[in-house]
Image: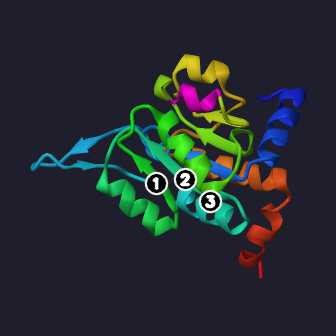
Amino acid sequence: MTEPANQLAHMQRAAAVKVMIFDVDGVLTDGSLTYGPDGEATKTFNVLDGLGIQLLQKSGVATAIISARQSPIVVRRAADLGIMHVHQGIHDKRVAFAKLLAATGVTAAQCGYIGDDVIDLPLLLQVGFAVTVPTGHPEVQYRAHYVTKAGGGRGAVREVCDLVMRAQGTYDAALAPYFA
């Protein structure tokens, strides 16, 4: 359970987020890769996460994907969700992050990032709001500002989207159309 002081700190960090960035494998998915008979890899995405991303975007927070792996499935999912900034196949994620900062005009402190492995550390150490999942590598968990309760591909992204909207005071407005 998050201690009250830590809860206040991560809520303050989440309140400053203007761009939320997602890793794919282990975050938007559970990290599994399934290969078909022709060698194609498939991934499974969570619909709760997808709606959370869309609600976050409608609340005024831009979204992005930075992934070391290259996958046409990710391009398709990003298009379905309206994620405009997609950087794949870049193993040094700092390169993609620098491009994203230049394209959006925000600072690193105004970004949130959710990743799960040591390849994500260079970004997690730069952003204002660093998040990981419960199965994230111990070095990542140690350095994250927030560890989700839900697992990657199992609602972790939705949890973070909801948290950011709550911290920014936009959560109730985002959900209001569903209560009308």
Outermost residue toward the front in this view: 102
Q: Residues within 10 Å of mark 2 (few under 14, many from 20)?
A: many
- Name the residue tied to disc 3: 52
Please give the count of numbered marks on the rendered protein: 3
Quick check: 126 above or below 19? above
Q: Earlier in the sequence, mark 2 or mark 3?
A: 3
Q: In the image, what residue type sits under mark 2? A: Ala
Q: Amino acid at mark 3?
A: Gly
Q: Which residue is mark 1?
A: 86
* Residues at marks 2 and 3, CA–CA distance in whole angstroms: 13 Å
Range drawn in magenta: 120-125
Q: Mark 1 or mark 3: which comes first in sequence?
A: 3
- Give the side of residue 141 with respect to residue 137, left or right: right
Q: Residue at x 18, y 49 (%)?
A: 40
* Residue 47 as seen in the image, left or right of residue 31: right
Which quadrant holds residue 32? top left
- Label 2, label 1: how far apart the Cα atoms are: 6 Å
Q: Which residue is mark 2?
A: 64
Above/below status of 142 relative to 153: above
Q: Earlier in the sequence, mark 2 or mark 1?
A: 2
Q: How is the image coloured?
A: rainbow
What amino acid type should be assigned to the residue bearing mark 1? Val
In contact (CB < 8 Å): disc 2 and disc 3: no
